[in-house]
Image (tube, grey):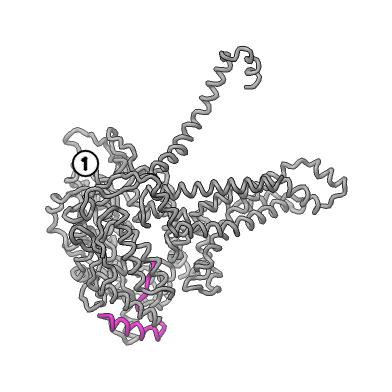
């Protein structure tokens, strides 16, 4: 692309045939992507934004509203309702607590595993790599079900040895259930994050190690002074993805809530959005559910930006 | 035994999984309630599982068969006459009205959301199964058709449940089954303990205490089923939670009759005389199998499957059905579930749809096989499996009696599903002792008013 544009520099106003041809074929190749992108990404977002500023109200009067509902424009009222709802912020609080504890543990373990596999201590790294990654390849729901088996005392090999708390089985009791879910998430995503680290580690040029060895660095020194600093950007990516994933916590609590019925329908913000849509929470409806989703997207986005900025400042 | 337990837990988790996967499919089609309705194209089949053989364009020339789609949630379990077979019989006899039945695999609430999306996109099925408590909600949202005139023609074939498909003066479909609360108990165990089947609150408490002293429970307080289980008991005690005055809703979920229900369970819980297993958790079935749970107040439709776990155990054939004990001195029982088949908005052939609807819901023996207590007045015979599990008792006759004792004054409000969630959370607290049973009904009061106001409906301020 660059070389013809340089040759076309003098008469810039008119594209050469070749440049035009290239532009057309370039856009033609990209078109399927843009179409699909608009259809499955942009359109739903626009539709959600539109929906979030409307609400459905009975219009016909009488006890049953005459069987008619009309869409009423309410501006930012839905957002206001969500933002002043205590249950929404308790949900955020739970997710936040979850992330503060679970993400460092998961990232730490993932880094450790990646360093071990990357070192020369491990034989047949391929097998280890695959087996650590395997939980991620298992669909999240299946994983949640497998862990469900381990948490219900009736079928679990060990859960009935643990005491009941507040009338619920140990793993499903109010103080513990968040960590039962954290355990499921950690199990699933540690291998995935490990792969990110491993890819970064293997991209480190070998001559760096060689030079370090010649200078007399020990294996420990190489790990702490070269390897870990060199995977900083991979850590940034892994943590960012984890933050976003945690904000969207849904599968685990939804499966677990079928086992622990004390869990409220708005335990996490994503569950709240879903149950609002399903009419299982008041206020209900698509407008309110969209407002929750958009607010969560904004919160996740700002968290990611904040983390990114903090990380950059630290690295300077 | 353990294998069976695994199977049960597996089935439960599979349901949870289905629920989730179904939601995954939904979210893609979510928000805009005003999805452009393309009326020029023929209504799309309900989903890809609809048999292709019977789909013809909707704009068929006159004289050709009318196509009716019917979406249901019936169990279609092993040993039952499948819905498709019943429908096939209709199709063979009625070449002009061809029905395609599709089973919805997922939770009731997800089916409602699907129907809402489908109606707005003009490709909803003509007929769909709706829980009685969902009917007002669907009507308010403008998702069901007014078929009052058609329905009146078939009124004689159906009992009291006919009114459950009415919203004010408008009738939107026909009833299918009803779920009066009854009392299930293990007669042999009762005899061994020397207790009688309780007939009122006092004898219920006494019997529970006697049994609990021997490590047996004659009931389980089930937080996950609190919504309909407790509102049904309140109805049985004579309560009317929702009524109308001057065209405004009057909400009263904490009246004297309901307090009697709260007092009963509070005393039983305080005395630790009842179990607190969730109805749909593994502990409930396990307690039945190990013989510690020997009775409970249950919906009539539970007789279709509640004892499956006991087949082949020493308790097989020992259980019986009796009427729900009278609470607050009221000889009535109340509804826990039950559904009808409603005509969806946009149905092009409501008359033909209702013709099938009436026929289908009077096939009482087939419906009884599906584990339902048919709403039609024609007597259904007790299926063989049920007869075996209940030691030869004429279960259907007992359930019909329960049906006749059902409170006719108890209706639901639009938005009732949202009330349920609040009740369940409060019930879980009551079960573990961190809350009171009365709190459940306080929660229902607040949630009901909030749900009505959210829908923009008039609520009387008390």
Q: Is residue A41 above or below residue A161?
A: above
Residue under the image location 46 percent in, 60 percent down: A267
Q: Is residue B180 above or below residue B127?
A: below
Q: Is residue A258 above or below residue B143?
A: below
Q: Provide the residue span drawn in magenta.
A: B197-224
Label 1: few (<14), some or many (≥20) within 10 Å?
A: some
Which one is nearer the viewer's eye here, B134 or A126? B134
Residue under the image location 45 percent in, 38 percent down: A40
Is residue A198 visible in the rendered image? The answer is: no
Question: In what quadrant of the picture does the N terminus of chain B appear?
Answer: bottom left
Report the residue marked by disc 1.
Answer: B348
Residue under the image location 54 percent in, 70 percent down: A159
Expressed as whole percent of the image width and height from the top left, the position of residue A60 reads 22, 48
Q: Is B436 left or right of B460, judged from the image as shown? A: right
Which one is nearer the viewer's eye here, B454 or B58? B454
Which one is nearer the viewer's eye here, A315 or B122? A315
Is residue B215 visible in the rendered image? The answer is: yes
Q: Is B143 left or right of A9, judged from the image as shown? A: left
Expressed as whole percent of the image width and height from the top left, the position of residue A64 reads 23, 54
Expressed as whole percent of the image width and height from the top left, the position of residue A276 reads 39, 53
């Amino acid at each position: 692309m660059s070389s013809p544009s340089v040759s076309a520099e003098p008469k810039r106003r008119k594209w050469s045939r070749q440049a035009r041809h290239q532009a057309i074929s370039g856009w033609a190749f990209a078109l399927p992507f843009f179409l699909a992108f608009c259809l499955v990404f942009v359109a739903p977002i626009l539709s959600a934004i539109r929906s979030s500023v409307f609400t459905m109200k009975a219009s016909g009067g009488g006890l049953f509203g005459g069987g008619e509902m009309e869409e009423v424009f309410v501006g930012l009222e839905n957002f206001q309702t969500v933002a002043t709802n205590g249950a929404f912020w308790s949900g955020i609080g739970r997710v936040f607590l979850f992330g503060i504890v679970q993400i460092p543990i998961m990232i730490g373990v993932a880094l450790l595993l990646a360093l071990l596999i990357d070192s020369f201590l491990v034989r047949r790294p391929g097998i280890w790599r695959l087996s650590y990654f395997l939980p991620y390849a298992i669909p999240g729901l299946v994983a949640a079900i497998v862990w469900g088996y381990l948490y219900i005392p009736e079928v679990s090999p060990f859960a009935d040895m643990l005491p009941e708390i507040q009338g619920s089985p140990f793993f499903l009791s109010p103080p513990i259930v968040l960590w039962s879910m954290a355990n499921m998430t950690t199990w699933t995503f540690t291998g995935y994050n490990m792969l990110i680290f491993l890819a970064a580690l293997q991209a480190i040029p070998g001559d760096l190690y060689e030079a370090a060895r010649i200078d007399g660095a020990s294996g420990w020194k190489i790990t702490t002074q070269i390897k870990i600093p060199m995977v900083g950007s991979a850590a940034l990516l892994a943590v960012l993805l984890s933050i976003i994933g945690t904000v969207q916590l849904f599968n685990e609590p939804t499966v677990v809530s079928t086992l622990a019925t004390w869990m409220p329908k708005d335990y996490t913000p994503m569950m709240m959005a879903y149950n609002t849509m399903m009419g299982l929470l008041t206020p209900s409806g698509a407008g309110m559910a969209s407002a929750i989703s958009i607010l969560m997207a904004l919160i996740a986005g700002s968290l990611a930006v904040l983390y990114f900025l903090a990380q950059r400042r630290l690295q300077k | 035994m353990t294998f069976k337990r695994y199977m049960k837990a597996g089935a439960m988790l599979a349901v949870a999984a289905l629920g989730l996967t179904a939601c995954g499919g939904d979210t893609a089609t979510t928000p805009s309630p005003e999805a452009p309705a393309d009326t020029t194209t023929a209504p799309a089949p309900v989903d890809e599982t609809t048999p292709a053989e019977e789909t013809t364009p909707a704009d068929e020339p006159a004289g050709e068969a009318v196509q009716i789609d019917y979406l249901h949630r019936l169990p279609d379990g092993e040993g039952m006459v499948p819905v498709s077979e019943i429908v096939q019989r209709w199709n063979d006899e009625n070449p002009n009205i061809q029905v395609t039945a599709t089973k919805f695999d997922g939770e009731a609430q997800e089916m409602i959301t699907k129907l809402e999306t489908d109606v707005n996109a003009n490709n909803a099925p003509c007929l769909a199964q709706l829980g009685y408590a969902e009917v007002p909600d669907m009507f308010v949202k403008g998702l069901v058709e007014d078929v009052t005139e058609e329905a009146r023609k078939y009124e004689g074939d159906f009992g009291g449940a006919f009114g459950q498909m009415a919203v004010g003066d408008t009738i939107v479909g026909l009833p299918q089954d009803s779920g009066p609360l009854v009392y299930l108990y293990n007669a042999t165990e009762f005899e061994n303990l020397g207790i009688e089947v309780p007939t009122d609150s006092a004898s219920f408490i006494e019997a529970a205490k006697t049994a609990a002293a021997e490590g047996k429970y004659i009931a389980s307080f089930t937080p996950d089923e609190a919504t309909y289980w407790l509102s049904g008991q309140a109805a049985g005690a004579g309560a009317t939670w929702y009524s109308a005055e001057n065209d405004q809703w009057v909400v009263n979920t904490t009246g004297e009759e309901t307090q009697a229900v709260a007092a009963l369970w509070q005393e039983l819980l305080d005395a630790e005389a009842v179990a607190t297993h969730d109805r749909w958790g593994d502990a409930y079935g396990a307690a039945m199998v190990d013989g510690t749970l020997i009775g409970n107040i249950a919906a009539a439709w539970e007789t279709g499957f509640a004892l499956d776990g006991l087949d082949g155990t020493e308790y097989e054939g020992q259980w019986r059905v009796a009427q729900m004990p009278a609470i607050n001195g009221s000889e009535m029982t109340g509804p826990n579930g039950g559904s009808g088949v409603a005509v969806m908005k946009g149905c092009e052939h409501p008359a033909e749809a209702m013709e099938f609807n009436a026929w289908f819901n009077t096939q009482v023996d087939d419906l009884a096989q599906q584990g339902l207590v048919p709403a039609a007045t024609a007597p259904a015979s007790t299926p063989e499996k049920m007869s075996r599990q209940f030691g030869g008792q004429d279960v259907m006759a007992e359930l019909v009696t329960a049906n006749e004792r059902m409170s006719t004054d108890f209706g639901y409000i639009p938005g009732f599903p949202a009330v349920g969630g609040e009740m369940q959370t409060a019930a879980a607290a009551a079960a573990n002792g961190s809350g009171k049973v009365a709190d459940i009904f306080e929660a229902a009061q607040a949630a009901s008013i909030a749900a009505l106001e959210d829908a923009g409906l008039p609520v009387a301020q008390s």
